[in-house]
Image (tube, rainbow, N blue to C red):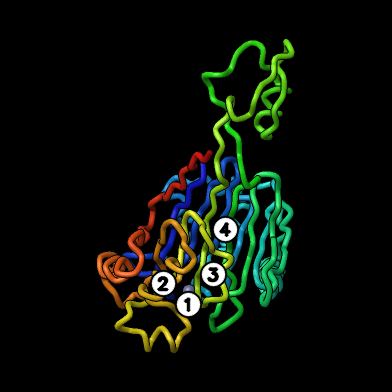
Amino acid sequence: MFEITILGNGAATPTHQSNPSAQYIQLDNQHLLIDCGEATQIQMMRYGIKSQKISHIFISHLHGDHYWGLMGLLSSWHLQGRKTPVYLYAPRALDEIIRLQLKASQTILNYALHFSPIPADSPCYLVETPSFSVQSFPLKHRIDCTGFVVRERPDIRYNLRKEMLGPTLGKAQILALKQGQDTTDTLGKPLRVDQYTYKFLARSYAYCSDTMPDEAITPYLHGVDLLYHETTFLHQDLDKALATLHSTAQQAAQVAHDAQVKRLLMGHFSVRYEKPAAAFEAEARRIFAESYASVEGHTYHIDSQAVG
Ligand SMILES: [Zn+2]
Ligand SMILES: [Zn+2]
């Protein structure tokens, strides 16, 4: 399973139609949160997400629309008696902001909050486990801001063909095949990995908000299955995008095209557009056909693709 649920896709301020940035990612048994704008807790309740499962949080930058829901979430977990640790990756200044708020309310969290500052000027692997990695990379915005790429690991995965399973395959044989190794069954008969498994490429998801279009990020995005790129404005408002270091739908589509991603998901829509979806999709699809306006509450699946 590799799914992204959009909790908020609006820019700057909450409205009746949209909430500030936040996304929940489930990658098999991993639960991640990217950005945590105001109302993220409420949105998770609304869409049936069990927030306690989240172990890793990534904050792109310290404009309030990307993290003003975080303190409330951390506090609720404390009040609910959470014991499992939380790994938080964010610009360095957030550590002090959190400490000050905890100090002022004389709160000592029940759980361990592990804070790791994200380098602002260079790419960095923030997380590398046997099953997934998260890499950050610098974006171009008014303050330090980073994008993220979430990737399955390893690069190639082997899933067993169920119809090939039988009594002469034990745990050791299954483990070897899943690791892509030829082996022998319990009677000594050779088992070839290409006969017993399907081969899949690792899936990937990239998040770029907030930023003006930047060619320098193309290598990090190259070939990802799904790219969420901010589109605060339509191109008719390019002057506003330039003034605030944001992107237009046309520019995001060009980024998606240049990076040869499979699908583009747009968001961080300015509140000036009342019903943005159709206009943003029409503009982006002139350059990149697989462009979609994100919808709050929708879960976007990334499917495995068999190879070989
Ligand atoms: Zn923003
Ligand atoms: Zn911003």
Q: What residue is shown at x 61% (from left), y 52% (from top)? A: 77
Q: Residues under labels 2 and 1: Cα distance?
A: 9 Å
Q: Earlier in the sequence, mark 4 or mark 2?
A: 4
Residue 304 position in % (x across, y down) = 49, 42
Q: Secondary structure at mark 3?
A: helix
Residue 269 visible to the viewer? yes
Q: Earlier in the sequence, mark 1 or mark 4?
A: 4
Residue 302 position in % (x across, y down) = 46, 47
Residue of label 4? 73
Q: Residues under labels 3 and 1: Cα distance?
A: 10 Å
Labelled pair 3, 1 in contact (Cβ < 8 Å): no
Q: Earlier in the sequence, mark 2 or mark 1?
A: 1
Q: Nearer the viewer, mark 4 or mark 3?
A: 3
Q: Residues under labels 1 and 4: Cα distance?
A: 31 Å
Q: Nearer the viewer, mark 4 or mark 2?
A: 2
Q: What residue is shown at x 59% (from left), y 30% (from top)? A: 194
Labelled pair 2, 1 in contact (Cβ < 8 Å): yes
Residue of label 3? 218
Q: What residue is shown at x 52% (from left), y 19% (from top)? A: 163
Residue of label 1? 213
Residue 162 position in % (x across, y down) = 53, 22
Residue of label 2? 254
Q: Amino acid at mark 2?
A: Gln
Query: Looking at mark 1, is its residue's CB closer than 8 Å to ligand 2?
Result: no
Q: Amino acid at mark 4?
A: Leu
